[in-house]
Image (cartoon, rainbow, N blue to C red):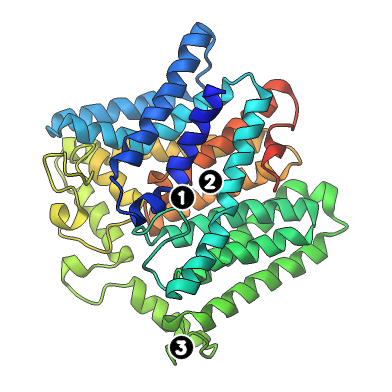
Amino acid sequence: MIRTVFHYTYWILIFLTGIFQLFGLSSGIYKLGIPLVSAGLFAYSFFTKGNQLKFPFLAWVFGFGIVAVVSSYLNQVDSFSLAYFLIYTLLSYAYFIVLINEDSNLLISRVVSFIKLLILLQVPAIIVKYLLIGQSEHGGIGTLSVNAGSVSTIFPIFIIAILFSIYLYKRKLKYLVLIACFSLIGIVGDKRAIILFIPLVLLICGVLFIKLEKRYFMKGLTNKLILLVGLCIAIFYFTARTNKTLNPENSNWGSFNVPYIVSYIERYTSSESNNKYQMRRKGALIYFINYTLEAPPNKMIFGDGAGKLIESKFNSQDGSMSSEYGVRYGGRMGFVWLLLQVGLLGTILYLCFFMRLFAYVKNRHESNPIYLSFLVLTIVFFIDTIMYSNVFLRYEYLKGLYFVILGLILLDKKYQTQYYSKLLLF
């Protein structure tokens, strides 16, 4: 019973962060609460399992941790900032270890059901936001956050990838309805990126499905392809008309004008000024890669210090991208965030770790929508981290859930069943 409460508390702190922020409660509730609850669960597993505790993929995690510590030491970054850097990047792995070493099927089932409930809660929460303040980047993003705008793009994409994977296998209308509902998070959040990212993720999902399952599903393949194309067109069309910046009239229901959209995207992603502070994502990505490659060897390999970009009143530096590097908007990608702090070595290790996870599941793939969704989500991680934001990399309602899915897949393999992964079916 106590363990169940600890698991529930862990996910409540993760998924209700936005509620705490909305009511002005101390950020320490979730910033300290989440790692402390995770540490308690890990300690219980460690002391009850002892040397029977399993640590899959430990070499990757340990190697990255060593690089982070060395980077922090070489650059004299304070211990608090280093600790929080490791929490941001590795906390999900600690919970993953707790999950795969859990013996109680009832506890696992309850925890997964509770996570699904918290996910579904985001739909009524976003409807309430629309009724109260309308379509806006500001305000609550479900119950997840009030100030991390990119969550409005990446979180719905994450859930839609899971739902569409399930639909391709189950072909039930409720999954299409849920996809439409979670698309509202991006639309109400006034996020332009969903016009490309949601259709892109659906296409990736469809291509992987055809590649992995064509021997078994050739009969319905044409219908699935028609549905996939139709969904992509519908989401593209609806987003273009409802987002003020994507139509010439700047209206919530403007005209559908593809040349205008293409022109806007090109202007939005490209830097129009020589001012470094105003650089956009594309220009900043090139700038920071060159910055790293031209740095002294120790900086190029280990970065400027793990924890340097941790923003907190308790650390010794400001920690923001704008004050540390003079770049505001363009430096928000997770790839840049990693590269600057742990250099080429740490970044390559971290990204290769996710490539290893992708290869592991792909090589052991079964005819199961959750296995497919994990592969798609790994690709989403790379798209987000390299091109868009650091949301997937830093927030547990994304990366934490990703590692829960991995844990359920490993439990399937351990007991030669599909019971655990199918707990995630909505």
If the image is split into quadrants, where does the N terminus sit?
top right
Left or right of residue 335, residue 155 in this image: right
Q: Are marks 1 and 2 in contact (CB under 8 Å)?
A: yes
- Element marked by disc 3: loop
In the image, 43 versus 75, the foreground residue is 43
Which residue sits at x=29%, y=25%?
66
Mark found first going from the N terminus, 3 or 2: 3
Amino acid type at circle 3 is Ser
Q: Residue at x 55, y 47 (%)?
A: 118
Q: Which mark is residue 378?
A: 2
User: Residue at label 3?
Assistant: 251
Residue type for callout 2: Thr
Lower position in the chain sequence, tag 3 or tag 1: 3
What is the spatial separation of the Cα atoms under label 1 and label 2, in whole angstroms? 7 Å
Disc 3 versus disc 1: nearer the observer: 3
Give the structural element (helix, strand or loop) at label 1: helix
* Residue 359 in sight from this viewpoint: no
> Camera-side residue: 116 or 263?
116
- Whole-percent x, y for residue 73 in the image: 16, 28
Q: Position of residue 129 (x, y in %)?
A: 47, 67
**Residue 411 position (above or below residue 323):** above
Select label 3 or label 2 by which is in front: 3
Cα separation, mark 3 vs mark 2, equals: 35 Å
Mark 1 — residue?
382
**Amino acid, disc 1:** Phe
